[in-house]
Every structure is written in structure tokens, then in C-alpha cells.
């Protein structure tokens, strides 16, 4: 039977990346996507912006929406202090299975909780079922038409506090127009656009960083 792209990506990691070395896993996936097959990871260029936001936020509790193969999961987790934790939501079981193996290969599994399911169903359970109070940082990288409803849901569930950071991928390509309009015009957010490029291409894309003002 034919392998899938995520399976081939995992194969490259297990063949070429050093176990327990997150930077090696990231480098291997970026090389795979540049030289073999494009995949929708945040990538190395936008990844550097992600890294700087994570390190400057110094978060204790992070939420990622859309794990895919775990590239940004590994990137974020590798920068977290020992007690910090990252909860990542993924509703496709095949992608979740691949991501778990990538996360474990990188050796960051102790900081990561991958939860299978739809964000709309899981976000309301974060406090009661996952013992979360509020998130210091949220990385949005799932279906682009879910960014806005999930942001409103996180507000309603009291999962954002004054100073919580939302970092959204792909606000230009594929684009998240309703989300951008909301965070840029709402008095409850201070938004900033980080211009970059679509992963592994010269096409414009960028990240939107929005601070929740309470
Ligand atoms: C139901 C809520 C919900 N709950 C839980 N998990 C969910 C979910 N909705 C989605 N997922 C999972 O997240 C991942 C999807 C991510 C979606 N990302 C893009 O579509 C994208 C596209 C391009 C691009 C493609 C083609 C181009 F030509 C240009 C650009 C570039 C990018 O960086 C991109 O992120 C998958 O693992 C889903 O299973
Ligand atoms: Mg993306």
C-alpha cells in the first residue's frame, strides 16, 4: 500500500535525525520539505519568529491548535522551561499517530500532551478535564476558518488572561480574513503582524501576534 506524506516525513526523521535532539528533528523536517516534499509545517523562516515569541513570552502553559506532524510542537516544546507544558490538539488520528512518534523521537514528550479531538469540543474541557487555568500562549495553525470561532470560545471559557498571547500562522496565505479583522479591530487585543513567507517558498505569508488585554 502507498505511504502517506506524513509517514514519509516520519521515516526521514527516524532515518536522519538524532534521537533526543529537537533541533536535529526540526532540521531534518525542513530539509525533507525543501528537498523532497513540501508539507504544511510552519517552517524555518516563520519558525524563527515563533521561537522568538515563545522565548520572550516564557510561557508556563501553551496551547497549540492543529498538531499535524508535530513540527511546531517540537519547536515550541524545545524552548519551554522544565515545569512548563504544551497541550496540542489534533483531530485526525493518522496525523496524531505520526506526531506522537516525531515528538518522542525529539525527546520532548514529557512537556507535551497531544489530545485527539476537535478544538471546538476540547477547548470547553480544558479547565475541568486538563487542569488548565489560563494559557500564556496559544499557537493557531489548524483549519483557517476555525481561528475566529475558537478564539471567541477561549474568551468565553475564561482561558485567556490579561497578557495572554495569540500567535496565528497563515494570516496571509491561505489567509484568515475574519480572524485578522477581529483581532485588529477589537479593543480587547493589541495586534502586530510579522511579515514572512509561506513555508519553503517565496510567497508572502506572516504571523499575527495578538496580546489579550483582558
Ligand atoms: C475542527 C478544528 C480542529 N481541531 C483539531 N485539529 C484540527 C482542526 N482543524 C484542523 N485540524 C488539524 O490541523 C491540521 C490542519 C492544518 C490546516 N493548515 C493549513 O491548511 C495550511 C495550509 C497551507 C497552505 C497550503 C497550500 C498552499 F498552496 C498554501 C498554503 C499552509 C499552512 O501553513 C497551513 O497551516 C491538520 O493536522 C488537521 O487535522
Ligand atoms: Mg500553517
Image (tube, rainbow, N blue to C red):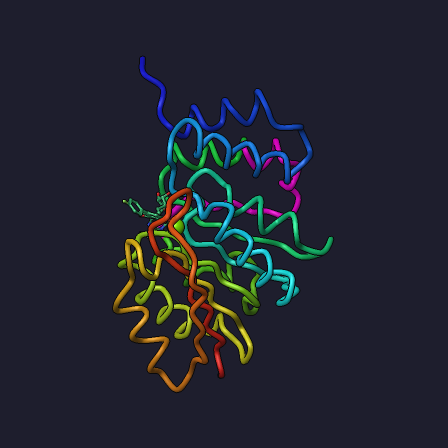
> Is residue 212 or residue 27 the one in the foreground?
27
- Horizontal and vertical percent position of residue 2: 32, 16
Q: Is residue 44 above or below residue 127?
A: above
Q: Is residue 105 magenta?
A: yes
Q: Position of residue 168 (x, y in %)?
A: 42, 61
Please state if 60 lies on the left or on the right of 90 as rendered.
right
Residue 145 figure quarter:
bottom left
Quadrant housing the N terminus:
top left
Which residue, as the protein is rendered here, is positioned at the far right? 82
Q: Count the numbered circles shown.
A: 0
What residue is at 63 percent from the left and 64 percent from the top?
59
Residue at the far bottom in the pictured view = 187
The x, y position of residue 27, in whole percent, is 57, 36
Q: Compared to 157, does 55 lie above or below?
A: above
Which residues, given as a range, are shown in magenta?
102-118
Q: Position of residue 118 (x, y in %)?
A: 35, 50
Q: Residue at 42%, 25% (x, y): give it.
A: 7
Depth check, front residue: 163 or 196: 196
Q: Is residue 12 covered in magenta?
A: no
Q: Residue at x 40, y 35 (%)?
A: 95
Amino acid at each position: 500500500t502507498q505511504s502517506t506524506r506524513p509517514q514519509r516525513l516520519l521515516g526521514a526523521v527516524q532515518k536522519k535525525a538524532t534521537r533526543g535532539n529537537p533541533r536535529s528533528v526540526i532540521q531534518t523536517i525542513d530539509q525533507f520539505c525543501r528537498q523532497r516534499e513540501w508539507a504544511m509545517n510552519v517552517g524555518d523562516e516563520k519558525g524563527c519568529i515563533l521561537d522568538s515569541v515563545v522565548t520572550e513570552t516564557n510561557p508556563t502553559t501553551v496551547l497549540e491548535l492543529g498538531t499535524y506532524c508535530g513540527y511546531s510542537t517540537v519547536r515550541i516544546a524545545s524552548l519551554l522551561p522544565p515545569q512548563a507544558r504544551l497541550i496540542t490538539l489534533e483531530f485526525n488520528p493518522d496525523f496524531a499517530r505520526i506526531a506522537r512518534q516525531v515528538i518522542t523521537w525529539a525527546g520532548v514528550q514529557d512537556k507535551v500532551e497531544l489530545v485527539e479531538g476537535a478544538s471546538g469540543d476540547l477547548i470547553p474541557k480544558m479547565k475541568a478535564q486538563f487542569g488548565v487555568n489560563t494559557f500564556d500562549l496559544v499557537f493557531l495553525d489548524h483549519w483557517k476558518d476555525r481561528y475566529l470561532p475558537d478564539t471567541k470560545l477561549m474568551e468565553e471559557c475564561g482561558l485567556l488572561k490579561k497578557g495572554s498571547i495569540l500567535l496565528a500562522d497563515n494570516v496571509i496565505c491561505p489567509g484568515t480574513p475574519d480572524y485578522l479583522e477581529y483581532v485588529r479591530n477589537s479593543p480587547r487585543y493589541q495586534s502586530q503582524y510579522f511579515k514572512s513567507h509561506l513555508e519553503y517558498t517565496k510567497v508572502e505569508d506572516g504571523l499575527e501576534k495578538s496580546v489579550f488585554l483582558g
